Image (cartoon, rainbow, N blue to C red):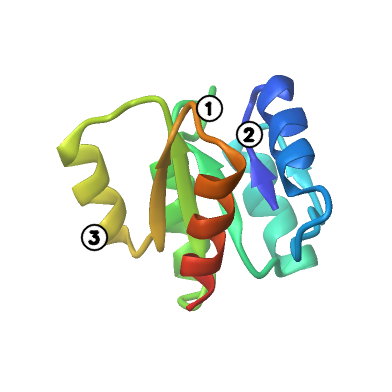
């Protein structure tokens, strides 16, 4: 599941995951939409942008982890603050990818999140 308010990021992730072991089951443009669809799709991994209108990625990740303690969430952001990474780890996120990212970074982070 890809959660990001940017259609450009949606396309980029879809492009980078072509011919990989990963399939995108759902694109969500907001945290609220992600919470609504998480139970329906039960994805192996969720990529989650942090800065979005409405519920931000950290808040959304926390709510998903409350619903499913085994959820694997990989936060993706252009914000590179240590305290943000620390907060993500405290929430239970499985990793953090900084924008811009390439195919190798994304795939390695997704495989790591599945461990």
Q: Residues within 10 Å of mark 2 (few under 14, many from 20)?
A: many
Separation of disc 1 and disc 2 at Cα?
7 Å
Report the mark closest to the observer, 1 or 2: 2
Q: Secondary structure at mark 1?
A: loop
Label 1: how many Cα within 10 Å (few below 14, some 14–19, many 20+): few
Residue at 17%, 38% (x, y): give it.
Answer: 82
Location of residue 23 (image quadrant):
bottom right
Q: In this rendering, would 91 be left or right of 30?
A: left
Task: Tell us which disc is closer to us: 1 or 3.
Answer: 3
* The label number, if any, that marks residue 30 in the structure image: 2
Q: Are marks 1 and 2 in contact (CB under 8 Å)?
A: yes
Label 1, label 3: how far apart the Cα atoms are: 22 Å
Q: Earlier in the sequence, mark 1 or mark 2?
A: 2
Q: Looking at the picture, how far across and down is residue 81, in whole percent?
A: 21, 31
Q: Which mark is residue 38?
A: none
Which quadrant of the view contains residue 3? top right
Residue under numbered circle 1: 54
114 vs 32, nearest the viewer: 114
């Amino acid at each position: 599941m890809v959660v990001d308010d940017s259609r450009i990021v949606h396309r980029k992730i879809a492009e980078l995951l072509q011919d990989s072991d990963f399939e995108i089951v759902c694109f969500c443009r907001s945290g609220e939409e992600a919470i609504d669809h998480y139970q329906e799709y039960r994805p192996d991994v969720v990529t989650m942008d942090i800065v979005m209108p409405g519920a931000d990625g950290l808040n959304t990740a926390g709510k998903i982890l409350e619903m499913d303690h085994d959820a694997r969430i990989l936060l993706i952001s252009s914000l590179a603050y240590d305290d943000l990474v620390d907060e993500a780890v405290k929430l239970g996120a499985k990793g953090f990818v900084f924008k811009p990212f390439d195919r190798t970074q994304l795939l390695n982070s997704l495989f790591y999140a599945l461990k």
